[in-house]
Image (cartoon, grey):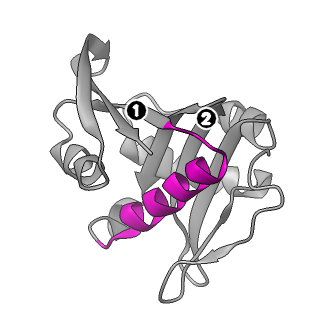
Amino acid sequence: MATGQGMEQVDAGPDVLIRPMEPEDVETVLGIESRAFTTPWQADTFLSLIGRPGSELWVIEHPVAGILAYAVLWCILDQAELANIAVRSDYRGQGYASRLLERILQIARDRKVETIYLEVRASNTRAVELYERFGFSRVGVRKNYYGEPKEDALVMRVLL
């Protein structure tokens, strides 16, 4: 099933909705992306993934504030990669990443995914702690994986 096709929107708590990303969301998502990452994805990357089989792109949307967070999951057979997740800087620390990650994990389970992998900057302790709370464990290190600044990536996985 491609990006959210046939999947319901989810009420994620007070005044927010988790729903599939749509092409018209990409401009807003790029604003979040460019503030969250030193080497952000470009619009064509997001647009090429929307609707592609195996790709799940989701956003958290507030009726007034707009899109607060997004996530990208790639599913291939019984494995998946959490390729991207970010929260708008003025909404970090309010549980939106947790809500979105809960939804992503449920989507993976619904797709019969058994293992999800991700890479995260070794210095991003808040993200590492979030992933560990959701059952991810460290399974490897990719030396000098990231540029600007050069840094190792922790490889993490969770078994569903």
Bin the neighbour count of mark 2 within 10 Å (Cα to Cα): few under 14, some 14-19, many 20 and up.
Answer: many
Residue shown at 42% from the left, 60% from the top: 88
Residue 102, placed above or below residue 114: below
Image quadrant holding the C terminus, namely top left
Q: Is residue 149 visible?
A: no
Which residue in the structure is indicated by mark 2?
Answer: 74
Residue 125, placed above or below residue 44: below
Question: Is residue 90 within the magenta segment?
Answer: no
Give the amino acid type for the residue marked by disc 1 in the picture.
Leu
Residue shown at 25% from the left, 19% from the top: 140
Residue 81, placed above or below residue 24: above
| CB under 8 Å between discs 2 and 1 | no
Bin the neighbour count of mark 1 within 10 Å (Cα to Cα): few under 14, some 14-19, many 20 and up.
Answer: some
User: Would you say 130 lies left or right of 55 here?
Assistant: left
Which residue in the structure is indicated by mark 1?
Answer: 118
Q: Position of residue 16 (x, y in %)?
A: 54, 80
Residue shown at 61% from the left, 35% from the top: 74
Give the amino acid type for the residue marked by disc 2 in the picture.
Trp
Extent of the magenta region:
94-114
Quarter where residue 79 is shown? top right
Q: Position of residue 44 (x, y in %)?
A: 72, 32
* Label 2 or label 1, whichever comes before in sequence order: 2
Q: Position of residue 98 (x, y in %)?
A: 37, 63
Question: Is residue 111 within the magenta segment?
Answer: yes
Q: Nearer the viewer, residue 98 or 115?
A: 115
Q: Is residue 52 visible?
A: yes
Magenta portion: prevailing SS class: helix
Q: Spatial distance from mark 2 to mark 1, Cα to Cα?
A: 10 Å
Secondary element type, mark 1: strand
Q: Nearer the viewer, residue 157 or 63?
A: 157
Quarter where residue 52 is shown? top right
User: Would you say 35 lies left or right of 132 here?
Assistant: right
